[in-house]
Amino acid sequence: MSRAAKEAPGRPREFDPETVLAKAMDVFWDNGFAKTTYAMLEQETGLRRQSLVYAFGDKKALFQAVLRHYAQTRVNVFIQELNAPGSPLANLERAFDSWLEDVRRESTSGCLFVNTSGELGPTEPSFAQVIEQSTQHLCQAFQKTIEAGQAQGEIISTIDAADLAKQAIAVGDGALLRSRASGDPSFAESAFRAFLALIRTRD
Amino acid sequence: MSRAAKEAPGRPREFDPETVLAKAMDVFWDNGFAKTTYAMLEQETGLRRQSLVYAFGDKKALFQAVLRHYAQTRVNVFIQELNAPGSPLANLERAFDSWLEDVRRESTSGCLFVNTSGELGPTEPSFAQVIEQSTQHLCQAFQKTIEAGQAQGEIISTIDAADLAKQAIAVGDGALLRSRASGDPSFAESAFRAFLALIRTRD
DNA sequence: CCATTTTATGAACTAGAATTCACGAATCAA
DNA sequence: TTGATTCGTGAATTCTAGTTCATAAAATGG
């Protein structure tokens, strides 16, 4: 991964792109795409706007890189939590719990993909595509975990796992959205609690 | 409602505010708050920008009026569907069906409140308040319907109705968001189908 | 040491959009 | 008819924000 870091011809860049991307992500996450200005990005990253443009392209290209960074960090670790060994139902509970932790820590941030989908919808295909692809991966991970839970008898098996997976994502997205808008984590807590109780097999 | 329309001192306005508000709502609904320009609003409403400013105030005030109009029309008819006489479960199904119809007809619109929450979150309290209040009304309507269904034995009663109501809203919001982003109604169809199947009592 | 290439910086440019100004038009009261 | 009040219209204004230009700095290769 870290090869070919020496033989560059010109002046070496003085920053780590991943680190800068992470900082930029926070700015976009807090403010959305339209309301984020280069002045904010300069403030947070410490770079001048032209350096950002040079390294990542214009504002849209930068945001696209940010979305990919979000998918590779946030969403993928979430997927790994779902794929952990052990009880599938427990994995689901832990996944929702980690969402709740985010909501409790900084309730006004929500999910970057949810916020972006709400702000821009399908109007910017380059953004929508990144989000769509990552969401499908997440959906598959949910489905796989749910199917495993159904096979083990932990999760109700009278309902199609693919439908349940989509419902899980819908609940997560909706709850994060509402919690962000209201600044109150209790909405997400209620919704998640109800969902987990519903899919558990009765005994 | 339509009293006191004659005794105005000056020149009478040449348009119906409600009609104009409905047209403006469509523009904001399609484009979001930031991306909507006065040029678009002029195009759609037929009014000049200064007439809009004079009648409704600046852009934020206009959008606030639009949000209230949305609550009074769209959301309130939805609530009435939930409150209809007859089977509570059937009312729930009909309510979700009417959401689906919207998604199928114009899949890229979604819900104005969801889109706005995603775009602006809590940064504009005057917007967030209108949305929050309307959402609470909707939540109460869901809860009431669910409680009635539980009393009649149609709906599973081992889970708190308040939690279920929040989950219903989360599913609706999330599914509308995703369907808008992808342009595909099938996500909402799956999520709704799973939710309705889950809350129905097994027999 | 010189040519080349890439990066950093400051300033200028440009476009778009919300707001405001000034004036004409329409209605009512007296 | 006149004055007061509100509404409609077109243009000007002002400001913000993304993009681009020109130049300096720092590395590599021969």
Image (tube, coloured by chain):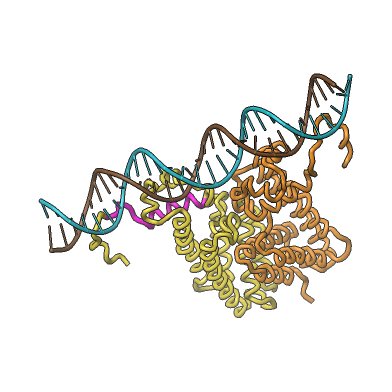
Chain colours: A yellow, B orange, C cyan, D brown
Q: Quadrant of the N terminus of chain B?
A: top right
* Residue A147 at least partly seen: yes
Q: Quadrant of residue A17?
A: bottom left
Q: Nearer the viewer, residue A118 or B139?
A: A118
Q: Is residue A17 above or below residue B104?
A: above
Q: Nearer the viewer, residue A125 or B187?
A: A125
Q: Quadrant of the C terminus of chain B?
A: bottom right
Residue at point 73% right, 63% down?
B102
The residue range painted magenta reads A12-29
Q: Height in image: B141 above or below A169?
A: above
Residue A26 place in picture, x, y as percent? 47, 51
Which residue is rendered at x = 62% and y = 55% of the image?
A: A177
Q: Quadrant of residue B176?
A: bottom right
Q: Nearer the viewer, residue B113 or B162?
A: B113
Q: Does B26 sit above or below residue A92?
A: above
Give me the residue at 83% from left, 61% from top.
B148
